[in-house]
Image (cartoon, rainbow, N blue to C red):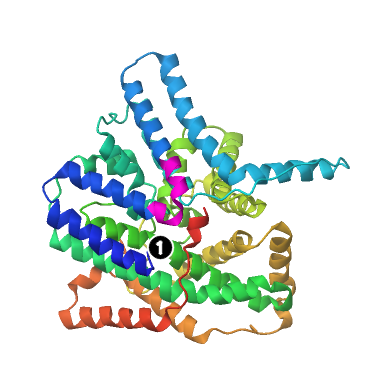
Amino acid sequence: MLFNSLEFAIFLPLVFGLYWFLLQGHLRMQNFLIVLASYLFYGYWDWRFLGLIIFSTVLDYTVGVLLDKTEDTYRRKLLLWVSIVVNLGFLGFFKYYNFFVNSFIDAFASLGIHLEGSTLKIILPVGISFYTFQTLSYTIDVYRKQLKPTKDFVAFAAFVSFFPQLVAGPIERASHLLPQFYVKRKFDVTKAKDGLRQILWGLFKKIVIADNFAKYANIIFNDSDSYNGATLWLGVICFGFQIYGDFSGYSDIAIGTARLFGFDLKQNFAFPYFSRDIAEFWRRWHISLSSWFRDYLYIPLGGSRGGLNMKIRNTFIIFVVSGFWHGANWTYLIWGALNAIYFLPLLLSKTNRVHTDLVAEGKWFPSWKEIGKILWTNILVLFAWAFFRAKNMEHALQYTSDMFLKIGEGLPEIWPQTEFILGISFLLVEWMGRSSKFGIEAIVRFPAWMRWSFYLGIIVLLFVFTGEEQQFIYFQF
């Protein structure tokens, strides 16, 4: 079920009504309703994969209970590895089986050895990368004794399957979200209004920004041989708008929807295109995934505490694995490696945490130096996006080389004027709201006539620019 669909527009009010008007004060029943609603939300796409999420829920709940009953080091490690191997085994089979088979065959073919192999027609279960990491965080935290295992199976099932963030995040930690299912929730009008504002802004990002820029990104990338360098750069700019509007828009809708039900999810995007270096970008982009890899992979590997070789190794591991998490394609691996290359000079020169403050804090405009840093960071990001968006490595290499080799062939051959007016206006709103958790959070302080005029304007734009219902990009991850 898509957030931008008629089905969800019917589903959400119905669940909301049952949750608050029928079951308020009945905590366990509210949690049970969330589980049922989440399974309906997920099963609407393909009910057959409900078995996977239910199995993962039962497995990690059981592992948590058993970890609490033993202090034996060997047993605890065995239980942890059962959870890791089974969860990552499912993820690996559905997401990477065909990739590894094809790569294995291609590797031997390059040596003149021709092997026969067969791939499978596997459908990737929506959201498997997200809920797998969410349940793993629970098991690992319980193993580390950083979290007390739950004995409330309904609450745990609700945590794993919570429909607002089930299929594309944010990836919530059990230590943050799970305890919220233990306490009685009272309807908060202020919180609900804030949630509706964030939902509205998320829908604007998705429908008006992402889906409209996607048309031009698709046209250019699907026929990239026909265009000059300036048009190819335009293509990655359009994709930059698309992926940010699409993914951060999903996160805004998810966080806003959770707030309607009395839950707080963590911020997943913090205005990353205003970053002054690549390290700041990664602290602001897909925060829940970046922090997950930091805490459960980078730090256990030694982080940046070791010598030069260890720092380089760990940086490449974290970024390449992050790329591989996105999909079974060499383009994602190269995208991750490129970001590692961008990041390394900052890490080695110990300047990767220079920009932890808000850009131009307390000011309307950044300095010329800050503008230069922001532009350079975005050029690096956009170049890497070309690999992320390309169909395969051959396409990526041809596209990126033509971006430079054909740059002198004239101005862009395509010019989405209306979309760029919308895009610039969108960035201006985001810039003014950059100190908030989402772009229009601070609008609550404006006069009522101004607020409602703005809301009405967004709603009009949603109807004017809406087209065919588009799936969110990160559903494929």
Residue 272: give x, y in percent of width and height.
43, 61
Residue type at the position of mark 1 = Leu
Residue 212: give x, y in percent of width and height.
49, 77
Residue 259: give x, y in percent of width and height.
24, 57
Name the residue: 61% across, 84% down.
Answer: 414
Indicate left or right for 291 with 330 as reference: left
Residue 422 against residue 43 in the figure, above or below: below
Indicate left or right for 108 with 160 as reference: right
Q: Nearer the viewer, residue 52 or 387?
A: 52
Q: Is residue 44 magenta?
A: yes
Q: Nearer the viewer, residue 211 or 144?
A: 211
Name the residue: 18% across, 60% down.
Answer: 17
Query: Mostly what secondary structure, the magenta segment?
Result: helix
Mark 1 = which residue?
Answer: 2
Q: Nearer the viewer, residue 392 or 360?
A: 392
Q: Is residue 435 magenta?
A: no
Magenta segment, which residues?
A: 42-53
What secondary structure is marked by label 1? loop
Residue 4: give x, y in percent of width and height.
38, 68
Residue 318 against residue 197 in the figure, above or below: above
Indicate left or right for 188 with 96 as reference: left
